[in-house]
Image: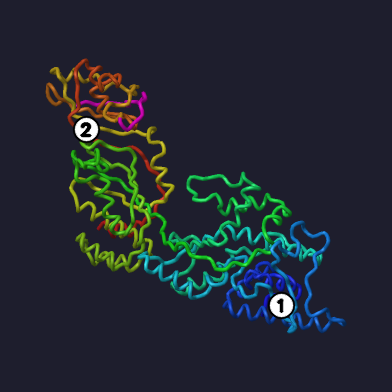
Amino acid sequence: MFPLTVENKHVAQLLLSTGTCPRCIFRFCGVDFHAPYKLPYKELLRELQKFLEAEEDESVSEVPNPPPKRIRLQEPEDQIDGMDSLSQNGEGKLSVTEDGSSSSKNSNLNVCNVCLGILQDFCEKEFIKKVCQKVEASGFEFTNLVLSVSFPPQLSVREHAAWLLVKQEMGKQSLSLGRNDIVQLKEAYKWITHPLFSEELGVPIDGKSLFEVSVVFAHPETVEDCHFLRAICPDCFKPAKNKQSVFTRMAVMKALNKIKEEDFCKQFPCPPNSPKAVCTVLEIECAHGAVFVAGRYNKYSRNLPQTPWIIDGERKLESSVEELISDHLLKVFKAESFNFSSSGREDVDVRTLGNGRPFAIELVNPHRVHFTSQEIKELQQVNHFMTWKLSCFCNSVTELELLIVFLFLILQKINNSSNKIQVRDLQLVTREAIGHMKEGEEEKTKTYSALIWTNKAIQRKDIEFLDDIKDLNIDQKTPLRVLHRRPLAVRTRIIHSMETRYVDEHHFRLYLKTQAGTYIKEFVHGDFGRTKPNIGSLMDVTADILELDVEVNHLIVEMPVYTLNSANIMLLQH
């Protein structure tokens, strides 16, 4: 059933005659159900022309004295200033020809003067197939997607001009048309293309999908349509760092909401001129939202930095904690890059023991996040797990649980690849969880073990007093060794408790529980007086630190995670 009624006839005739496509005519007539938009364009145009011809035949038969074969729409005396003959450029002249059909001065131009071809060529199956070919060639694996389209900002200007034209014509019939009564271009485009994309790719369109296909349109021929708005509303067009042009859609819409209708009509033709060409596609891009993996690591080497150690472009050590962990995840998820973060950091010669240091890795634009039970079995065989137990597990879990099992096996692969680090509690987390890991770092506590040397010979009794010191406040000026990358400041830190163990007359082991962010090495040797008090000053000796270990990280990271149920965990652990 054709969606337009006799009440829409005059608006439909007017818009068609001025170069507007059938689907845009539906939008201006408030057609808000999907089916009519989905018809092939040529069929739509044919049906619209049949509708208008039938209505014209009926109207002519009802008139006792038919008007001359050629008539022109007459404007009311109170028409909007600047809209003479509907256009300053003489466009939009409606005539009735001898055969009774509507025609236009520009009837030989097929490109819609409102959507610039968006709802014409770019809604057809041929274009959808081209986009889908790009998607399939991108190398991403996905089970659903979200479609994002970016239209030229001048479409808003053209739609505004067409709206003013229709609004004026409807006013003659004592009818009104608000901006919100028009079906949005993106809505109509979505109604038409979403089913086609879903059918072609074989996956549903899901607004919550992390896999995004974006199509960016441009129309160089009409790029200057927006420029007059800047002269009238300069405050709406302010340069932004991340924007190539000030004429963004939001800026244009803001200006259109401010400009007076009569000022608009003086500057821009109503109806808008018909273009010579349709829009062009600037880019078709595929991207997947980041995947966040978190856990804890232990570092057992005293010759391994947390992140790549590069000075003046020269690499000092061949590997790092960051690389030993992330390289495996990058390969498995086929991510383009990664961002590594952790709760604090240790020096290259410091071990991290105990429950490990919390870390998180953002895998940027991963090309795969879905894994099959067969892939899990293959990885399991590499890790020398018991195949039959994992097989039982994989036959009874969801896709999300398969991914978690896959992470568990990656953890094993990381741990088997190096004796310098070990990873535990590897899990999927949300973006928000990364922020939680950083929150309150300095309010937490850490436990250290340090082997200390003194220049003077000492006895057990010389160090026992340290055991009685509680909640000692120290002032630490930014250490010399980090001054090149940290601002100069004096930071107050707390040494909550200390416990000593005598080794020999020049060595003892010190166990400390401190506020997170305390520079332990400087607390021992004083850093040329930049940390006060320090072990040397407290004992009245020259002290230095030979070994340092992080024993316990008391930071409790509250991370919303995806976990397996206890029964499945037991199956993996046994």
Q: Is residue 320 above or below residue 192?
A: above
Quadrant that contains the N terminus: bottom right
User: Is 485 included in the stretch rendered in magenta?
Assistant: yes
Q: Which mark is residue 102?
A: 1
Q: Main secondary structure of the magenta part?
A: strand
Residue nearest the observer in this picture, 45 or 497: 45
Q: Which mark is residue 517?
A: none
Quadrant that contains the C terminus: bottom left
Q: Are marks 2 and 1 in contact (CB under 8 Å)?
A: no
Q: Please indicate whether residue 539 sits to the left or right of residue 335 in the image.
A: left
Residue at the spot 63% in from the left edge and 61% down from the top edge: 158
Categorize mark 1 by other alpha carbons within 10 Å: few (<14), some (14-19), many (20+): some
**Residue under circle 2?**
548
Residue 359 location, quadrant: top left
Estimate the x, y position of residue 190 in percent, counting from the top left: 55, 67
Tell which residue pokes out farthest to the right in this image: 64
Q: Element type at marker 2?
A: strand
**Which region shows up in magenta?**
484-501
